[in-house]
Amino acid sequence: MHLFRRARIPLACLPPPLNRPTSAASAAYEPWRECDVLVDGARISAVLDSGPPGDPGPGVRTTDLGGSLVFPGLLEVHTHLDKCHTWDRSPGVHSDFWESLNILYKDAARWNEEDVHRRADFGLRTTWAHGTVALRTHLDSSRDVGEGSHAAVARLRDEWRGRIEVQTVSLFSFTNFFSGHAGAIVDRAARHKAVALGGFPQPNPDLPRQLDSIMAAARELGIGLDFHVDESGLVHAECLRATAEAVLRNKFPHPVACGHNCSLSVQAPERAAETIALVKEAGIGIISLPLTNLHLQGRARGPAAPGAAFGAPRTPQWRGLTLLHECIEAGVTVACGGDNVRDAFIGWGDFDLVEVFVESVRLAHLDTRLAFAPSVVTTGPAAIMGLPGYGMIAAGSPADMIVFSARKLYSLLARPSTPRRLIHGEEFRERLLPDYSEQEGWPDA
């Protein structure tokens, strides 16, 4: 056993009664509690308020963390391992959403099992080095695309077992699903143990029937749903609302999550509030992807000169954050994810959920509810992914922790590059980031 003393743990990641605010004058903007954490093997066995040093008992090693800020292992709730690290061969320098989609559609011809395994393993090594312990990836699926991706990530799920819990979602366009590819998509999801059917519904008169049909398929498989929804600034895009109505209409029994939800923020407040109430009633988890959506949404160009494909870029007037605060206040489970990494949708990212946390706080003004904020990369995604005990430092939780050199949340928020050490089980573990020079030796690099 190993006792880690004097760990300053965010209240959002502690169990009751330890998660109650302290009486310190700084508690409103430094909502953490200093605790001692006892680890036995791969699990945390006890968490207590820090006390004076004493004899921890026979066979118990002790490490004093000195009041360092400590987070549990983080959870990536929404990413795309099949697309990651394709930027160098298929960049989207000026891309909007649809152009990026087309670039990656062409690149998908190369997504055989070895290609995806090589790129996705680089991604998993990266996220492990940053402190992530669970990851859900969407994998493009149709009759012609996806077999190699699903096979590769199924291999990686086994190879990373005990370190990163890897979940997969079959991602497809509704047009594709309803034009003869449904059987192949559902079969692949079943064979490769996907946790959910995904898809990106588009507004159309037939959407209710389409949602009913996809829910019937997911019910047959005994799995959930995880949709890309309303990733635009279109006021009339209300696929989130339609999904909530379909969940209630079908009494769908499995977990449902909706990612992006950008258009919710441009709708009339009364209409948005009604939609959020339906989302709460339906039990849908809401996922925001701040980094990619602020990059992708609101992209505009002036008129193109004769013979030019694109006009001069214009400053964005709208960005793609959903109504996070309104969802939180309504009691909806929310999470933030990193989404795409180094592909045509966005040329950067590093599978680092500390970056996602810090930028989510800054961009969505989650500093105004800082006691809650760490949950967007810890307990929120754990609830959506169905991983009880993850995202917490509590008795029975996995013994994975991130120890920052910072002693306060505002220090971490000020300097996201703050050094960190990683605990896995009873030991500190190596934190080795793969070097991008490795990719120069890949085929098609």
Image (cartoon, rainbow, N blue to C red):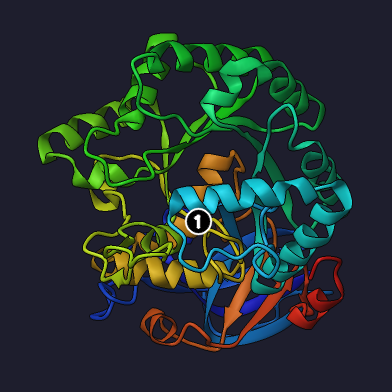
Residue visible at 48% across and 82% down? Answer: 416
Residue highlighted by disc 1: 337
Q: Quadrant of the C terminus?
A: bottom right
Q: Nearer the viewer, residue 421 or 225?
A: 225
Crowd tier of the residue under label 1, counting other residues whose Cα lies within 10 Å: few below 14, some 14–19, many 20 or above: many
Residue 214 percent across, percent down from the top left: 55, 17
Q: Quadrant of the N terminus?
A: bottom right
Amino acid found under the numbered disc labelled 1: Gly
Q: Is residue 370 visible?
A: no
Residue 186 percent across, percent down from the top left: 70, 21
Q: In the figure, 91 relative to 204: above or below?
A: below
Q: Quadrant of residue 271?
A: top left
**Is residue 132 rendered to the left or right of residue 260?**
right
Residue visible at 24% across and 30% down? Answer: 275
Count of numbered tags: 1
* Secondary element at tag 1: loop
Residue 161 percent across, percent down from the top left: 82, 51
Q: Quadrant of residue 66?
A: bottom right
Q: In the figure, 259 relative to 33: above or below?
A: above
Q: Is residue 213 visible?
A: yes
Residue 403 percent across, percent down from the top left: 60, 79
Q: Nearer the viewer, residue 433 or 87?
A: 87
Q: Nearer the viewer, residue 388 or 342?
A: 342
**Is residue 134 rendered to the left or right of residue 224?**
right
**Is residue 103 rendered to the left or right of residue 124?**
left
**Is residue 158 rendered to the left or right of residue 189?**
right
Q: Nearer the viewer, residue 275 or 22?
A: 275
Q: Quadrant of residue 19?
A: bottom left
Residue visible at 61% across and 66% down? Answer: 342
Residue visible at 71% across and 16% down? Answer: 183
